Image (cartoon, coloured by chain):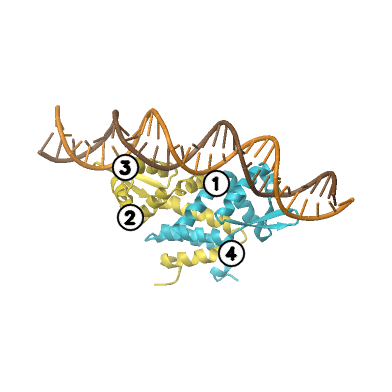
Chain colours: A yellow, B cyan, C brown, D orange
Amino acid sequence: MDEGQALASFGALSQETRLQIVRMLVVAGPDGMAAGAIAEKLDVSPSNVSFHLKELDRAGLIGQQRESRSIVYTANFHVLGGLVRFLMEDCCAGHPEVCASATQVAACCAPAARNVP
Amino acid sequence: MDEGQALASFGALSQETRLQIVRMLVVAGPDGMAAGAIAEKLDVSPSNVSFHLKELDRAGLIGQQRESRSIVYTANFHVLGGLVRFLMEDCCAGHPEVCASATQVAACCAPAARNVP
DNA sequence: TCAACATTTCAAGGATTGTTGAAATATGGA
DNA sequence: TCCATATTTCAACAATCCTTGAAATGTTGA
């Protein structure tokens, strides 16, 4: 991820509704959620949620796919991971102590990274 | 870091000049940089850089300290690390593969996290 | 104290972003 | 085909953010 993409990602995540959408889609996983379901759960108008979904899509943070009448959105884990990486590389430059806590988080959800069976 | 703080951090980092300031300060380390030096290196007017520094300060991403005539700014590694952690916890929810790449980055700059002497 | 330096504050203006509701588009079933 | 559902698009307006340059603040040394 280059600086321009990071900038776009930060901009996309800097709005409350959009951050909530991303968090919901991350929890939803690969199945994703339909635009209407997102709007209902967040109590936001369909047109407003559509506006924010387009914004997140432009930043590459989510993807979309028509499924019958609905349009189902999913989090783009690859880009999300790239953003973590960008932030870590930037804040790690000579500052290992920052990464240490990140490593702890990683260890707790990525068993493959540790020797825990 | 709570959602509100993350929102503020993302907003602060979503502006080119501010992102560049943070990256410079991270590289500068604990010594930090004076406002004037930042302005000169980024070729931005003093008043403009001051505006952005205030914004970054409000988000807690940087700290400041008067040093004689200059005001020296430093990156807040604690908050930066908290942001990485926030992003990781969000995007790790059930998705270990994202954290795996982050772990690699961490390993390369945090020797303590691995068994490399 | 005065002058020079380093930085911030302020007001004004322009640019971008977010919200709203109405109308348009696309899909599936009766 | 017609209707209901799901979503997007559009225009208008409001709100926020960024930039600029001039003036104010704080600091140091002569």
Determine which residue is flagged by label 2: A28
Residue B40 image position (x, y, % from top left): 70, 44
Q: Which residue is mark 4?
A: A96
Describe the element under mark 4 as helix, strand or loop: helix
Helix, strand or loop for disc 3: helix
Q: Between tags 3 and 1, which lies in front?
A: 3
Q: Residues within 10 Å of mark 2 (few under 14, many from 20)?
A: some
Could you tell me how far apart the alpha carbons at marks 2 and 1 are, in whole angstroms? 28 Å
Q: Which chain letter matches label 3?
A: A
* Residue type, label 4: Pro
Task: Please tell me if label 4 and label 1 are on a single chain.
Answer: yes
The reply, left or right, for residue C30 in relation to residue A22 is left
Q: Give the numbered dot on residue A46.
A: 3
- Disc 3 crowd rating (10 Å Cα; few below 14, some 14-19, many 20+) is some
Mark pair 4, 3: CA separation:
44 Å
- Disc on the earlier residue, 2 or 1: 1
Give the Cα separation between the discs numbered 3 and 1: 32 Å
Disc 1 crowd rating (10 Å Cα; few below 14, some 14-19, many 20+) is few
Label 4 packing within 10 angstroms: few (<14), some (14-19), many (20+): some
**Figure quadrant of the C terminus of chain A:** bottom left
Which of the marked residues, 4 or 1, is nearer the chain's N terminus? Answer: 1
Rendered view: B107 above or below B58:
below
Does mark 3 fall on the same chain as mark 2?
yes
Q: Position of residue D29 (x, y in %)?
A: 85, 54
Mark 2 or 4, nearer chain start: 2
Q: Position of residue D18 (x, y in %)?
A: 57, 41
Image quadrant where residue B109 sits: bottom right
Q: Are marks 4 and 3 on the same chain?
A: yes
What's under tag 1, amino acid-wise? Glu
In terms of depth relative to the viewer, which is nearer, A88 or D12? Answer: D12
What amino acid is at disc 2? Ala
